[in-house]
Image (cartoon, helix red, strand yellow):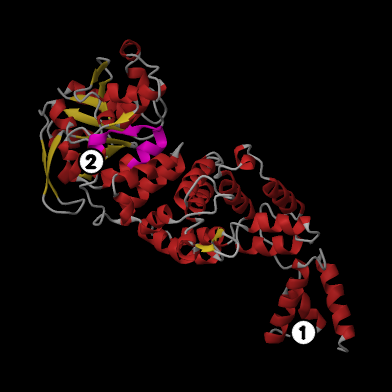
Amino acid sequence: MFPLPLTLHSIRGRPLDLLRRPGLEPALAVMEEMRRRGGRPLLVGGFVRDLLLTGEPPRGDLDVEVQGLSAPETERIIREAGGRVQGRSFAVFALAGVEFALPRRERPTGPGHRDFLVEADPHMPYAEAAARRDLTMNAMALDPWEGRLLDPWGGRIDLAAGILRHTSPRFAEDPLRVLRVMQFAGRFGFAPAPGLIALCRTMSLANLPRERLWEEWKKLLLQGTRPSLGLRFLRRCGALSFFPELQALADTPQDPEWHPEGTVWDHTLLCLDAAAGLRRGEREPDLLLMLGTLCHDFGKPATTYRDEERNRIVSPRHEPEGEAPTRTFLARISGESRLVEQVVPLVRRHLAPNELYKAHRRGADVRSAIRRLALRTDPLLLEKVARADHLGRHTPDARAGDFPAGEFFLARVRELELERSRPAPLVLGRHLLPLGIPPGPAMGRLLDRLFEAQLDGGFDTTEEGLELLARWRREEGR
């Protein structure tokens, strides 16, 4: 539960100051012009919610609902200031990163997310306009001139109590809202109300385009403080069935000695929360980390069985077997093929840091293996996925935060200077031409052989590589 550090009295003390920041000057000037022409622009949605949560005006997108002006009047003011129409049929306009919309009625006409009949009504009472919003905490509005908070659906009470509650039965008109609840639960740690869970059980995600799914998944993975709560909600409301790769984890057992926390599902949720603590605020690396962690054990449902001879639950080859369900899951929620190709190697090799550490302790030189690993995936990201995998257990070492395999792996990665770039061949074709070796298959095979020797630690400079080549040629009588 989050406290509310900002009272209504303190809002009244600095209403317009909320908008006096660089970049918002054009939007503020438009809002003042709207007031001069008889309109009433209100700050709505996430801006008001986050303001009440943190006591500071949020830096993200700003939404304004304009009462008292017709759509043509609003459009005229926006265009005069250099703005644009974002959706005329929805009476939505944009200027300087701020979205302006009129109160409107929406009536669903089909199963698609665009299948709505929209009627703008600038004189609609705010309580009626807010009824179409998803959750009570998002249905509040703030008049920055009067310093007045409009809260017809009790959002402030639910915000203070840490409860996610639907504003009205109209919540069910857009099934994407199920995933919005998912990411809000993971981001804020709020508990969905029983009535909201029951309503979400009646909704289907089947007709949602993956672009809309992906936006909500990204918010969960990049902003969730406890993303496990979002996934627990999906399971409670039955929506996990739309993601069978995740649902299969809930029925897959693990050996209690290594995984006393329970099933692969229980383990994955703990791993996700651990991974959230390893994010660094960089979008792509953080997204790869979270997706790699979410998908890392997708191969276990197909490979897990009880080894009666050892009386153990085992999952042999679950790393490579996780590739296919990872690709299927990511294709369902995202169309970013480049992202998929970066996540798959993390899934296929998430045990590597542990295995290399064990080999090192047995006396093996693992530097060559680490170089080769760095050809396939980012070793720093791989270590984070492996660390989240390790910490997502209820064993004493995991609870203590100890992961010596990760420390060893990172030290070797730095020693081999693999932190920022993959190993690259030191000897190239242009180095072989002066030696009388012409381009062609024979040169290609020779370069491959030299690169293998380089990865094995046979040489560290181009000159040393050419010396090795000269020795080979002498030994082979060339």
Q: Residue 456 versus residue 261: which sits nearer the camera?
A: 261
Q: Which mark is residue 235?
A: none
Q: Is residue 219 above or below residue 43?
A: below
Which picture quadrant has residue 139? top left
Count of numbered circles on the image? 2
| Quarter of the figure with the N terminus | top left
Q: Which residue is mark 2?
A: 198
Residue 416: in sight, yes or no?
Answer: yes
N-terminal-most mark, 1 or 2: 2
Alpha carbon of mark 1 to alpha carbon of mark 2: how far? Answer: 73 Å
Q: Secondary structure at mark 1?
A: loop
Q: Which residues are magenta?
A: 182-196
- Locate residue 396, reporting x and y percent: 62, 40
* Magenta span main SS: helix
Q: Is residue 90 above or below residue 426?
A: above
Using residue 46 as the reference point, say whether residue 463 is left or right of it: right
Q: Which residue is mark 1?
A: 437
